[in-house]
Amino acid sequence: MSNPASPPGVGLLDEGSAALTFPPGFLWGAATAAYQIEGAVAEDGRTPSIWDTFSHTPGRTVAGHTGDVACDHYHRMPADVRLMADLGLKSYRFSVSWSRVQPDGSGPANQRGLDFYRRLVDELRAYDIEPWLTLYHWDLPQPLEDAGGWPARDTAGRFADYAQLVGDALGDRVNHFTTLNEPWCSAFLGYGAGVHAPGRTDGTDAVRAGHHLMLGHGLAVRAVRASRPGAQLGVTVNLYPVTPVSDSPADTDAARRIDGLMNRFFLDPILRGSYPTDLRADLRGVTDFGHVRDGDLAIISTPLDQVGVNYYTRHVVSAGTGPAEPGPSCWPGSEDVRFVSRGIPVTDMDWEIDAPGLLETLQRVHREYTDLPIYVTENGAAFVDAVVDGRVDDADRLAYFDAHLRAAHAAIDSGVPLKGYFAWSLLDNFEWAWGYTKRFGMVRVDYDDQARIPKSSARWYAEVIRRNGLAAQ
Ligand code: FCB
């Protein structure tokens, strides 16, 4: 997009006003994930992952949508990188498809798969865009699921081998690595509620999966660091402030429990080397934690170089009696907790728009857990977009970004070492079980002809990046 002009609407950048400036070198980026954009699922030696299997299983995704073609990014990568350059992105966060680079989930690398990512990284570097590589964004090779998936301990070791393989192949040109994206989703949506791949529904398995994901993370950090000592290594967790609907002891306790399962389940082992005592007690009826072996927590808490936070919304909860919903749950042991809507504006996902929650989350991670550099590795919103005269004026998405960037700036002002921000997402894409029915992109994708149209939010973001800041309100 050449010559971006400020769009009408919220958050206009006025050259004359006192700007909210971000620190020099702030890493402005956008994020995607392999299965959500690449397509080309059977090309150049790629084999199925759990998301291929899941999306091809009737009834699992809206209208049976699959990632078979998605945004066809595998074939359109150079043009997509040009688009990023036009936006002025300083960094691009993408994920590697494990099934593309190590089709059996173990054993030798698939050179043609690695070559794609090499070309991508070289293309990014040619435009001075810092590549930010996520090793695992939910797409476990199907053979590893067939061997037990993440509830099986062995999968952690397979993940470390794969990480080493990618580190060896790309570590000469990639500095930033994220091991896992949102392990909560992999574990609790994939093995608990069963609404994500692989679609299994056993709370005990979900807890085991969560542990083995973290074990794989720790082993992967060690493996990549051993061969690439200069690499910046971290993990991305999705965090939600959890607020009780009232200050009654029952509601307060419901919030404590959900915070335990959602946030502290991952933050404590990774950044403190232990599971929270109250969480262990809450999960008494689900697991005896017999899957945790001596030494695991030392591996899981291997020191990192950065922490990634994905933020979308807040959870407001109340205590209930009996399961909140029939059927499998992503809240093992706390199925009774109710999720309350406050009646404030929501996105097309029905997620409440709560920018102060981002400030709260970043402050909490810094205050309670770490002095490490923090990056917002995802933040964004789905809205229903309309193409009018070839343009998409997504004022609602633009306002969402604007409000959350103001919260990010407030976090920096308050002393949080926030070093970068990645919008989710660069492109409209395959939104998991929602298929193509939810649009998160700053750039519109027409799935009939794969045309890309930068929306108003993209033009606005380009201006934010160019000025390294926002207008004062
Ligand atoms: C996050 C995922 C990402 C995308 C956004 C909307 O949980 O990491 O792939 O689906 O939500």
Image: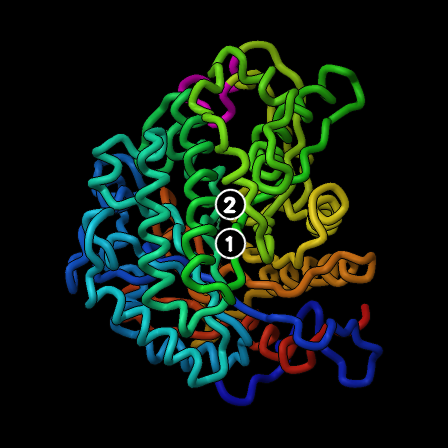
The residue labelled by disc 2 is 349
Is residue 183 rendered to the left or right of residue 275? left
Would you say the beta carbon of the disc 2 residue lies within 8 angstroms of ligand 1? yes
What is the x, y in percent for residue 383? 52, 55
Compared with residue 234, is residue 208 higher up or lower down, i.e. above or below? above
Which residue sits at x=31%, y=56%? Answer: 97
Would you say the beta carbon of the disc 1 residue lies within 8 angstroms of ligand 1? yes
Mark 2: which amino acid?
Answer: Met
Is residue 104 rendered to the left or right of residue 365? left
Q: CA distance from mark 1 to mark 2?
A: 6 Å
Residue 239 in view in this figure: yes
Crowd tier of the residue under label 2, counting other residues whose Cα lies within 10 Å: few below 14, some 14–19, many 20 or above: few
Say whether residue 327 is magenta. Answer: yes
What secondary structure prevails in the magenta region?
A: loop
Residue bounds of the magenta highlight: 323-332
Mark 1: which amino acid?
Answer: Ala
Quadrant of the rendered structure where residue 405 is?
Answer: bottom right
What is the x, y in percent for residue 364? 73, 44
Q: Secondary structure beneath disc 1?
A: loop
Which residue sits at x=31%, y=76%? Answer: 119
Q: Earlier in the sequence, mark 1 or mark 2?
A: 2
